[in-house]
Image (tube, rainbow, N blue to C red):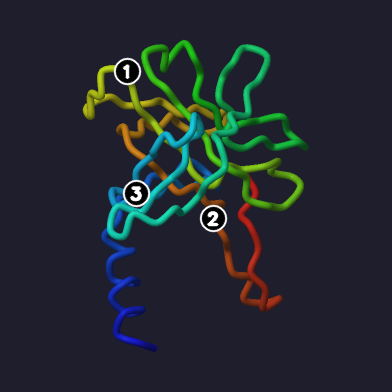
Amino acid sequence: MSQKTNKNKKDYWKLKKYQQGDVLFIKRDDIFVENKKGKKQIMNENDNMKIYGNEEINKLDDDNNVVIALGEATGHRHVFLNENNNNLNINTFGYSWNDSTLGNVPRYVEIANDNNDTNVKAKLTHEEHNPIELPSGIYKVKIVREWDHIGGVSRNVVD
């Protein structure tokens, strides 16, 4: 393993993480959103390289709430409700392929407001978990994985 890879792994553990059930948000201070030709893209601050270039794709429900993950079997969802986050802009970028029971989960979430106030927090809710608050910023979104020692396989956590 190269020295650069070891450094990146050490830095990963320093990143601020927030978890609600099976959904993990990793705060990324080294990336930013840039408007280019009317489209938003996520850029790496260190080398100004594009990380993710698709325009934001917000998965909205009938009430315009931003849905992060949906349990198709239970109907439960990880969601930013408008009533809790009415002064915020919550944008999602791209979708990760995941187990079909989770629906499409965005690769990144941006939480911001029109005043560029960095002290704002967005509240994420779920029917079976306590709400969590995420400070403004950009987050990499992942589904937590678990290791089955008996079967010798890794799989997405399902809640």
**Mark 2 / mark 1, whichever is N-terminal:** 1
- When asked about the image quadrant of residue 79, the answer is top right
Q: Position of residue 121 (x, y in %)?
A: 32, 26
Front residue (pair 36, 11): 36
| Left or right of 2 in this view: 116 | left
Rendered image: mark on residue 158: none
Tell me the residue that label 2 is attached to.
144
Q: What is the CA distance from the residue labelled 3 to the residue labelled 1?
A: 19 Å
Taking the spot 62% from the left edge, 76% from the top edge, the residue there is 149
SS for tag 3? Answer: strand
Q: What is the CA distance from the residue labelled 2 to the residue labelled 3?
A: 22 Å
Dot in front, 2 or 1: 1
Q: Residues within 10 Å of mark 1 (few under 14, many from 20)?
A: few
In the displayed structure, 83 sits above or below 134; it is above
In the displayed structure, 147 sits above or below 159; it is below
| Left or right of 26 in this view: 52 | right
Q: What is the CA distance from the residue labelled 2 to the residue labelled 1?
A: 32 Å
Tell me the residue that label 1 is attached to.
114
Taking the spot 59% from the left edge, 15% from the top edge, the residue there is 64
**Mark 3 / mark 1, whichever is N-terminal:** 3
